[in-house]
Image (tube, rainbow, N blue to C red):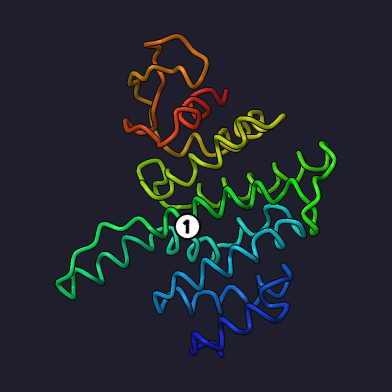
């Protein structure tokens, strides 16, 4: 099972290995790695689309702290780069960002889905808010485990999607402050650049810092990073 991608996919799809936190963290992660190592990124993303909401409901952001899953998640985030390298070796060309867009869409769908129950009915505001923040927090924490996420284009693209969602939820801004404050000290000096800032509600021409001298994908994200005092 650990060497056959099809067997790994089936096991994760129909057994508790892909649907309960303990089983996934003990054995399911290794099965997901089989798919990623075989460059079967589409099946891996489809599995995560189903598994992540279940795992987050069970243990909130705990999945983001499992080192083996962090490595696999990084590989999936970089799926487009991997496939471009494969095509280049075959003397073909590709500029696709398909997998990045899939992951960004999946993050958006997970946040939207957290507002509804299993039957698609809207949850009470307080319950929906808590679930949305739990999902968004897990995504942010996972994305911040991508090495040098501040200059990693796919990670920043997905982080942009999640950060914008959190910015519009009561308590989301404070949660972003808290998460970024925990990692801020690891990324060096913040260098200023200029953006219009209109999306942040700040004056036109205001200085919005970036990380390590380079802008992150989202104005909101950049502003959050700089204001985690």
Horizontally, residue 126 falls left or right of residue 204, namely right
Q: Is residue 21 above or below residue 120?
A: below
Quadrant in which the C terminus appears: top right
Q: Residue furthest top?
A: 203
Locate residue 50, reporting x and y percent.
64, 65
In depth, the one of 210 and 197 nearer the eye is 197
Against 226, is 137 above or below?
below
The picture places residue 154, in percent across and down from the top left corner, at 39, 50
* Badge 1 element: helix
Spot occupied by residue 165 in the image (x, y as percentages of width and height): 60, 37
Query: Which quadrant would the N terminus be assigned to in this image?
Result: bottom right
Mark 1: give few (<14), some (14-19) or many (20+) Cα within 10 Å: some
> Residue 83, located in which quarter of the rendered image?
bottom left
Total labels: the figure holds 1
Above or below, 130 against 88 in this view is above
Q: Quadrant of residue 22?
A: bottom right
> At 70% across and 46% down in the image, what residue appears?
134
Q: Which residue is mark 1?
A: 102
Task: Tell whether 65 sits left or right of 73.
Answer: right
12 relative position to 74: left or right: right
Q: Position of residue 147 (x, y in %)?
A: 41, 52
> What's the residue at 51%, 49% (across, down)?
143
Residue at image position (57%, 33%) is 181
């Amino acid at each position: 099972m650990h060497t056959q991608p099809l067997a790994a996919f089936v096991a994760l799809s129909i057994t508790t290995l892909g649907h309960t936190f303990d089983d996934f963290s003990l054995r399911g992660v290794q099965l997901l790695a089989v798919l990623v190592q075989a460059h079967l990124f589409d099946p891996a993303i489809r599995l995560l689309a189903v598994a992540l909401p279940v795992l987050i409901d069970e243990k909130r952001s705990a999945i983001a702290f499992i080192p083996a899953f962090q490595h696999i998640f990084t590989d999936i985030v970089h799926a487009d780069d991997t496939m471009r390298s494969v095509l280049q070796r075959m003397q073909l060309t590709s500029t696709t960002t398909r997998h990045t867009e899939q992951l960004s869409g999946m993050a958006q769908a997970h946040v939207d889905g957290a507002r509804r129950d299993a039957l698609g009915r809207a949850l009470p505001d307080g319950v929906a808010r808590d679930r949305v923040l739990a999902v968004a927090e897990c995504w942010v924490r996972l994305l911040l485990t991508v090495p040098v996420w501040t200059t990693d284009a796919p990670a920043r693209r997905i982080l942009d999607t999640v950060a914008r969602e959190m910015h519009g939820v009561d308590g989301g801004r404070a949660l972003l402050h808290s998460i970024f404050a925990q990692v801020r000290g690891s990324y060096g000096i913040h260098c200023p650049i200029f953006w219009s800032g209109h999306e942040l509600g700040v004056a036109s021409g205001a200085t919005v810092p970036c990380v390590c001298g380079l802008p992150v994908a989202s104005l909101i994200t950049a502003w959050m990073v700089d204001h985690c005092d």
